[in-house]
Amino acid sequence: MSIVLRVERLVRHFPLRGPAAWAARWRGAPPPAVRAVDGVSFAIAEGETLGLVGESGCGKSTVARCVLRLLDPTSGRIEFEGEDLAALRGDALRRRRERLQMVFQDPTASLNPRLSVRDMVEEPLRLHTRLAPRERQARVAEVLEEVGLGRELMDRYPHELSGGQRQRANIARAIATRPRLVVLDEPTSALDVSLRSRVILLLERLRERHALSYLFISHDLATVKYLAQRVAVMYLGSVVEEAPTTELFARPLHPYTRALIAAVPVPDPEARRERLVLSGEIPSPIAPRRGCPLRGRCPLEREACAAEPPLREVAPGHRVACHLV
Amino acid sequence: MEAAADIAEAAPPARGARFWRRLRRNRLSFAALWVLAAIALAALLAPWVAPFDPNLPDPEAPLAPPGWRHLLGTDLYGRDQLSRIIHAGRVNLLIAGGATLGALVLGAVLGAVAGYRGGWLDQVVMRATDSIMAFPAFVLAMGITAAIGNSLLNVAIAIGVTQVPSYVRLVRGEMLRVREMEYAEAARTVGNPDRRIVLVHLLPNCIPPLIVQATLAMGYAILTLAALSYLGLGIRPPQSEWGQMTAEGASEIVTGAWWLFLFPGLAIVVTVLAFNLLGDALRDLLDPRMRGL
Amino acid sequence: MTAPLLEIEDLAVRFDTEDGPVEAVDGLGLRLAPGEILGLVGESGSGKSVTAYAVLGLVRPPGRVLRGSIRFEGRDLLALPEAELRRVRGAGIGMVWQSPRTALNPVLTVGHQIARLLRHHRGLPPRAARERAVEMLRLVGIPEPERRARQYAHQLSGGMCQRVMIAMALATQPRLLLADEPTTGLDVLVAARIMELLKDLGRRTGAAILLITHDLGTVAESCDRVAVMHAGQLVETAPVRTLFRDPVHPYTRALVAAIPRVDREVALEPIPGAVPSLLHAPPGCRYAARCALATGRCRQERPALLPIAPDHQVACFAAEPVA
C-alpha cells in the first residue's frame, strides 16, 4: 500500500511574549514557549484511517492544522504525495489543497452563513478545476447526493439546515474535489447521539468508495475504535503509543493509554473492567520536560522514568514510549 | 434512503419572514420606517408632490400663516413653505445619503484591509483614524468646508470624512472577530486566495452592524448638514436646505412668523428621530449581541 | 418503599414561540428516593433539561408550567411563593450546570462564591464560611484548596471548574442534586473522576442525584435507575441493569444500538428520523414516525406509561403490561 502522508519529527512551538520571555532572555536561557507539538511522526497509507487521540491540550488539533498548513510548523517534514508541504508556500501550497481537505469540529461555525449549500460546495471546484459551469453543477449535485443531502436543500443557507445536515454539507465541501486525504477534526463531537452514528457511517462509506485516507482527530475513543484502522495516542505534544486499532484496545501497553481506555464509560452496568487511575492533571506544556511526560502522574513510575523513553516497536506495528514495557 | 432520513430532521424556518414579523411588532420603529419612506418618496417626486413651485412668489400672500391655501404658510416673498420643505428635502437626503454611502465604502475597505492584514498597514490606518477622531466631528466638518468651499459635493465630502473613522473601527473590529471563525479557516483550507477570503467570506459577515451604523449615521449627517447651513457654512441660497431655512425663519421670528422657524426645524427633528429609531430597531434585530447598549 | 424525596406528577411545560406553542415536557412523572441516582436520558430536544428547570422553578417566559405537581419532601414546589422557593432552591436542591466556567462568577474568587452561599443559606459567620469553603474544595478533590480558593474561574481548568461547581452545589448540604450533563465537554479522564466524585459524595452525604445526560455509558456506570425521555415524554423507566439487559421500548433499544462502544464490536444502527417537531406534535405515540414496529393504533392513540414488571414501566402498545 502506498503512503499518502508521512509526518516526520513535526514540532510546533508557540513562543511566549511578555515578562517571562524578557526574563529568560536576560538570563540567557532558551526563550519560553508552549510546546504544543514536540516531535510527532506518523504515516497514513492510501485508504487508511489513522485515529489521533488524546485529551484537550495534547496537541492533536495543532498537528491537524500543521498538516493543512493553517499553522506553520516550527520544524519537521510533512510529506504529502511525495512532496514536503512544510517547504511550500503561496500559490504552490494553495494548489495542493485540491488533494488535501478538512472537516471541522463545529458544523455551524465552519459554514459561512452567507453562502448557500450550492455555492459552498461549488467553491473548491471553481478554485481548483476547469470544469464548465454545467459540469460543476452536475458534480455538486452528485456530491450532495453522496453525502445524503437532498436536491431541495441545495439552495438553503446554513441557518436553514439542521445540525446533521450542516455537517453533511461540510463533508460534501471537503470531498468535492476528490481529495486523497481528509483531516477530520472531531467531526462528530458536536453532534447528538443519533446524528453521530449516521455521520460515522457516512464517513466510513465515503472512505471505502473513494479509497480516501483519513487523519481522524478525536477524544472519543469509541468512535475512533469504530472508524480507525490504526490509532496514535498523544500526550503533552508527543505520541506515546501507536498500534493497529484492535491491538491497541485489546492490549494497551502505555499506562496513559490504559488509563484512557479504562475511563471510557461503557453502556453495560455489569461490565467489570480494569481501572488504572492517574493522579493530578495535565502539566503545563510550557515547562521544559525531563524524562517521561507522564512522570508524577503514573502509578507505575520507577527510577528509570527519569530518562525520556524512546518510541520503540514492541510488536509488528505497535510502538510504545515507556520504559516498563 | 439516507437523504430521506435526514430531511426528517427539523430545519428552522426562513429568516426573512421572521425578520419582517419582528420589525412589525416594534410599532414605533415600524412607524419610523413608514415616515422615512414617505419623506424619501416626497423628495424623489418633489415636482409632482409639491402643491406649488417652491420659487414662485404668491404676491397676494406674503408671510401668510398656515391655512387652507398654504398649509404651512408662506415666507416673506410669498413662497409656499410646504413646497420649499419638500424640495429642500432632496438636498438634505442627497447630501446625507451620499456622504454616508461614501464614508461607508471607504471605511469598510480600509477597515477590512487593516483588520485582515494587521501589521504596519493596520498601524498606519488606525493612527490616521485616531488623528481624525482627535477633532470634534463638527469642528472638523466646518474646517473642511471653510477650506475647500461649500459646493454640494464639498459639503458631502466634509460630512463624509468625519464619518469614515467610525466605519473603519467597526469593520476592523468585526474582521478581527470573523477572521478567527472556523469558516475563515475553512475558506483557507478549501484553497481560496486572500482577496477572495476577505471579499466573499469575511466582509459580507460584517454587514449587519454596518447597516445599523449607517442608519444612525444618516440621522447624524442630516443634523450636521443642517447645523453647517444654519451657520452659513453649508448650503447657500438660492439652493435651500432645512437647516438654512430654519436659520432664515429664526430671523423672521421677531415679526411673529413662527411657522417659518418651526416647520423646517420639525422636518429635521422628525427625520433624524426616524433614522435613530429605525437604527436602534435594526440593531436589535440584526445584532442581538448589542442589545441593550 | 421509602417515601420519595422528589415526586413529579403529570408535569407539562409549554413554550410559546413565535411559530406557536411547543410542549417541551408533556405528562412527565418521576419519583426519586433519598440517596438514589436517577439517570434521565434522551436526545437533545427530548425535554431533559427543561424538566430540571421546572424542578428548580426556573422556567421563564416564553415558557410556563402548564400543569402537574413537583413534590419535594412532600411540598409542592409549583405552589410555593417565590421567596419560599428560593430557600428550597438554595438549601434543599443543588444544581450542577453543563458549562461550569460560564456558571461561575468571573469577578469573584471561587472561595468567596462558596463562602457567600454558606453565609446566605446556612447563616455561617464570614470567617467560618471561608474555612468551610476551603474544606468543601478539599472534599471535591481539589489539590491545594487554600490557594485555589483565592483564584478566579479563568485560572482553573475545565475539570477544576466543574469540581468547584459541585462544591458549590453541595455546600449547603442539599438532599437533591440536579446534574445537567456534568461531564459533557470534559476529557474522558477528567469526566471519569467527576462521576466518581459525584457518586462518592452522593453516598457520603446521602443526597439523591438526578443525572441528566445523553451518554448511556455514564448512566450505566453511575445510576441506580434510568428514565428515558423522547420528545417531551417518558417512554421507559427501569432499574439500570434491567434497562440495559432487557430494554423494552423500541426507542430505548435504538438508543443503545446507535452508539459506538469500546468494550465490544457492534454494528452501528442509527435511530431513524429525528425527534419530531413539537410544534405540531402527532396525536399518537411521538416515536411512531421513527418506529419500525408502529401500527395504525400507534399513530392514533397515545400509549400510557404502564408497569410491565415491578419498577419497570414502558409506554408502548407492543409491550405486555402486567394485569
Image: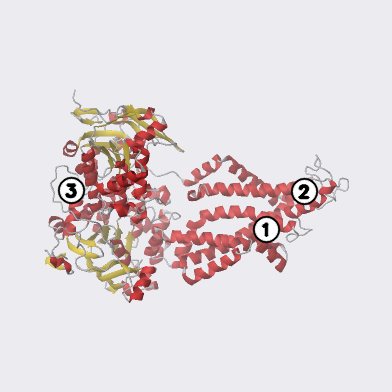
Task: Name the disc covering residue C266, or none.
Answer: 3
Label 1 resides on the chain identified as B
Q: Which residue is mark 1?
A: B95
Question: Which residue occupies the foreground of this view, C192 or A91?
Answer: C192
Location of the C terminus of chain C (image quadrant): top left
Find residue C14 and report its horizontal and vertical position in percent: 40, 33
Q: Which residue is mark 2?
A: B261
| C277 left or right, relative to C140 | right
Considering the numbered disc 3 on the image, is that residue within a helix, a strand or a loop?
A: loop
| C226 left or right, relative to B214 | left
- Kind of residue indicated by mark 1: Ile
Q: Nearer the viewer, mark 2 or mark 1?
A: 2
Considering the numbered disc 1 on the image, is that residue within a helix, a strand or a loop?
A: helix
- Kind of residue indicated by mark 2: Phe
Task: Check if mark 3 and mark 2 are on a common chain.
Answer: no
> In the picture shown, does residue C310 fall above or below B272?
above
- Residue A256 sits in which quadrant? bottom left
- Kind of residue indicated by mark 3: Val
Task: Check if mark 2 and mark 1 are on a common chain.
Answer: yes
